[in-house]
């Protein structure tokens, strides 16, 4: 098992389906996963929620959801999708409540990325 597969197992996602999307090239997939760590969507979402800026939070959550879908971050995708839909309806308070679980999944990915080095 290579490091990328270990990473996907650690975050509870299906490595094989994601690897297929990336032509079974673990090096390219790893590069995109590491690039995710510098993406600003999560931080923008957190800040926007703190400021009750539903519109900025929506766009950040929607972007995060798309990235998670492409990278196969299944659990973070589910959480960001739920937050996106709440924010689409301008339901900031429920989105804030759901954000705690989203943040846990995000942190799990960040911490598990150590497996890739």
Image (cartoon, grey):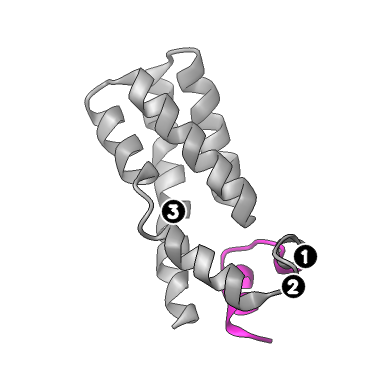
Q: Quadrant of residue 24?
A: bottom right
Q: Nearer the viewer, residue 7 or 35?
A: 35
- Element type at mark 3: helix
Per the model, the C-alpha gap separating discs 1 and 3 is: 23 Å
Name the spot of residue 45 as percent of width and height, x first: 35, 36
Q: Residue at x 70, y 68 (%)?
A: 15
Q: Residue furthest bottom?
A: 1
Q: Nearer the viewer, residue 71 or 11?
A: 71
Q: Main secondary structure of the magenta part?
A: helix
- Kindly identify which residue carries mark 1: 20
Left or right of 61? Residue 47 is left
> Which residues fall within the magenta stretch?
1-16
Left or right of 106? Residue 22 is right
Q: Nearer the viewer, residue 35 or 49?
A: 35
Q: Residue at x 41, y 34 (%)?
A: 60
Name the spot of residue 78 as percent of width and height, x first: 60, 41
Q: Is residue 109 above or below residue 112?
A: above
Q: Is residue 111 above or below residue 56?
A: below
Q: Quadrant of residue 52?
A: top left
Q: Are marks 1 and 2 in contact (CB under 8 Å)?
A: yes
- Kindly identify which residue carries mark 3: 106
Per the model, the C-alpha gap separating discs 3 and 2 is: 24 Å
Q: Nearer the viewer, mark 1 or mark 3?
A: 1
Name the spot of residue 75 as percent of width and height, x first: 59, 50
Q: Nearer the viewer, residue 80 or 104?
A: 80
Q: Residue at x 45, y 21 (%)?
A: 87
- Kindly identify which residue carries mark 2: 24
**Label 2: few (<14), some or many (≥20) within 10 Å?**
some
Per the model, the C-alpha gap separating discs 1 and 2 is: 5 Å
Q: Of the two numbered discs 3 and 2 on the same chain, state the one appearing first in sequence.
A: 2
């Amino acid at each position: 098992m290579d490091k990328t597969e270990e990473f996907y197992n650690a975050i509870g996602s299906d490595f094989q389906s994601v690897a297929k999307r990336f032509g079974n090239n673990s090096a390219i997939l790893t590069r995109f996963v590491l690039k995710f760590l510098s993406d600003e969507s999560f931080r923008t979402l957190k800040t926007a929620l703190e400021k009750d800026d539903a519109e900025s939070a929506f766009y950040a959550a929607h972007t995060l959801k798309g990235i998670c879908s492409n990278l196969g971050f299944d659990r973070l995708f589910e959480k960001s999708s739920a937050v996106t839909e709440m924010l689409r309806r301008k339901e900031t308070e429920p989105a804030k409540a759901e954000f705690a679980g989203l943040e846990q999944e995000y942190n799990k990915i960040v911490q598990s990325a150590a497996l890739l080095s």
